[in-house]
């Protein structure tokens, strides 16, 4: 006959079952305060406090404005990218989508097309580029890594064909001013309100809808997810469409912010996006992650890069730091998992020896 006893002490509890080893259960608040998202938030606060007290010119509303303007494209693209990676896929073509969108935007505007129609066509272009990735991955069954490496080069090449080495400027001043305008004296860009809407949409989609819960199942086991009725191909197709659409939106913002349409706009930004997503707790193997964690990851990597730039470190150092954070975000969870396994094995062995000695 089994016997179950629960002993509570402070915020922790210990559960014992006859014939089984004691199991320590943490309270809800303890789990939240020690979660991956919480640890990343502590790291963000530590970096901000250090920069605020040690780096000249960081403590100003102007710095807040430029920092947030820098992270807006990364934050936008990181939202759908997080969902894609949670399903076990990846999209490396996002920066090239930004570049091609910028090039097409410049050429169409230079040709006299009304700016409103230009913006709509650019969003449709991003949707089509994302759908093309989704078609190759879900319909033809090709690996997303190989597909999006190919379209990374393909889309960037199309951008060069469309606009060449030229740059188009002189976009409507009301739009360029709006892209960098601030909320009063806070230094916070007005565009952040749009970014918050996008983040809220993907947060609700991932955490509060059956579709979002299905994405975690896809990341854990695609065959099992299909067995319980989840339409794997359709879900992944629409995620690639969303990355294309949001990347084109980031391309429009990039072009208006710098008032310059060029084929090499946002080159290499995919590295920062993926590093921020993984740093925010999304597993590169799929099945794990959260939108709040991704937002913290983007802000952390953006703050580190901006602080280094204010401290007059070169772009080479920024690339090294970004690459190091990317590797750390992949390796650290595996090391932590290995350490937890070792500790659990040692604890299990010790308790079994104590149990045998007692008998």
Image: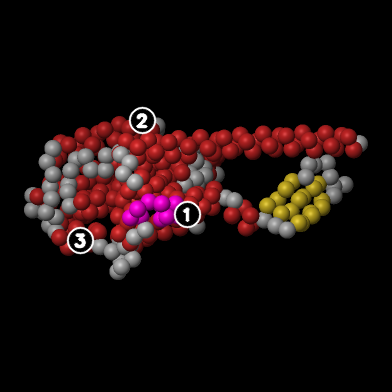
Q: Nearer the viewer, mark 3 or mark 1?
A: 1
Residue sitting at x 30%, y 31%: 150
Q: Is residue 33 covered in magenta?
A: no
**Location of residue 115 with respect to 356 vertically, above or below:** below
Residue on which the image places disc 3: 177
Report helix, strand or loop for mark 3.
helix
According to the image, label 1 marks what residue?
45
Q: Nearer the viewer, residue 191 or 65?
A: 65
Identify the residue at image location x=83%, y=41%: 19
Q: Earlier in the sequence, mark 2 or mark 3?
A: 2
Residue sitting farthest toward the bottom:
184
- Kindly report the distance in space between the C-alpha atoms of the residues bearing marks 3 and 1: 31 Å
Give the position of the C terminus as an image quadrant: top right
Gap between marks 2 and 3 measured at Cα? 39 Å
Instruction: Name the mark on residue 146.
Output: 2
Q: Which residues are magenta?
A: 48-58
Which mark, residue 115? none
Task: Answer few, some or many: residues within 10 Å of disc 1's Cα (few below 14, many 20 plus, some between 14 and 19).
Answer: few
Which badge, 1 or 2, comes first in the chain's sequence?
1
Residue at position x 52%, y 44% in the image: 288
């Amino acid at each position: 006959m089994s016997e179950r006893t629960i002993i509570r002490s402070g915020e922790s509890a210990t559960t014992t079952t006859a014939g089984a080893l004691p199991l320590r259960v943490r309270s809800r608040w303890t789990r939240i305060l020690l979660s991956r998202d919480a640890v990343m938030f502590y790291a963000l606060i530590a970096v901000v406090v250090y920069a605020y007290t040690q780096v000249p010119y960081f403590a100003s509303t102007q710095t807040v404005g430029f920092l947030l303007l820098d992270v807006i494209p990364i934050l936008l693209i990181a939202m759908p990218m997080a969902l894609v990676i949670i399903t076990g896929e990846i999209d490396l073509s996002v920066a090239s989508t930004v570049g091609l969108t910028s090039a097409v935007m410049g050429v169409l505007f230079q040709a006299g097309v009304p700016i409103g129609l230009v913006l709509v066509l650019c969003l449709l272009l991003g949707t089509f580029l994302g759908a093309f990735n989704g078609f190759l991955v879900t319909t033809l069954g090709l690996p997303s890594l190989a597909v999006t490496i190919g379209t990374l080069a393909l889309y960037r090449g199309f951008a060069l064909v469309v606009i060449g080495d030229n740059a188009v400027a002189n976009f409507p001043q009301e739009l360029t001013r709006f892209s960098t305008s601030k909320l009063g004296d806070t230094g916070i860009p007005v565009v952040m309100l749009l970014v918050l809407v996008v983040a809220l949409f993907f947060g609700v989609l991932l955490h509060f809808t059956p579709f979002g819960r299905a994405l975690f199942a896809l990341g854990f086991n695609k065959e099992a997810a299909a067995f319980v009725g989840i339409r794997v191909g359709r879900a992944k197709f629409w995620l690639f469409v969303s990355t294309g659409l949001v990347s084109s939106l980031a391309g429009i913002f990039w072009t208006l912010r710098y008032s310059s349409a060029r084929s090499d706009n946002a080159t290499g930004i995919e590295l920062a996006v993926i590093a921020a997503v993984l740093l925010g707790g999304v597993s590169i193997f799929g099945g794990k992650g959260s939108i709040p964690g991704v937002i913290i990851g983007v802000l952390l990597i953006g703050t580190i890069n901006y602080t280094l730039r204010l401290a007059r470190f070169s772009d080479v150092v920024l690339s090294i730091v970004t690459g190091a954070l990317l590797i750390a975000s992949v390796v650290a969870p595996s090391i932590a998992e290995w350490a937890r396994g070792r500790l659990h094995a040692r604890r299990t062995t010790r308790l079994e020896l104590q149990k045998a000695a007692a008998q």
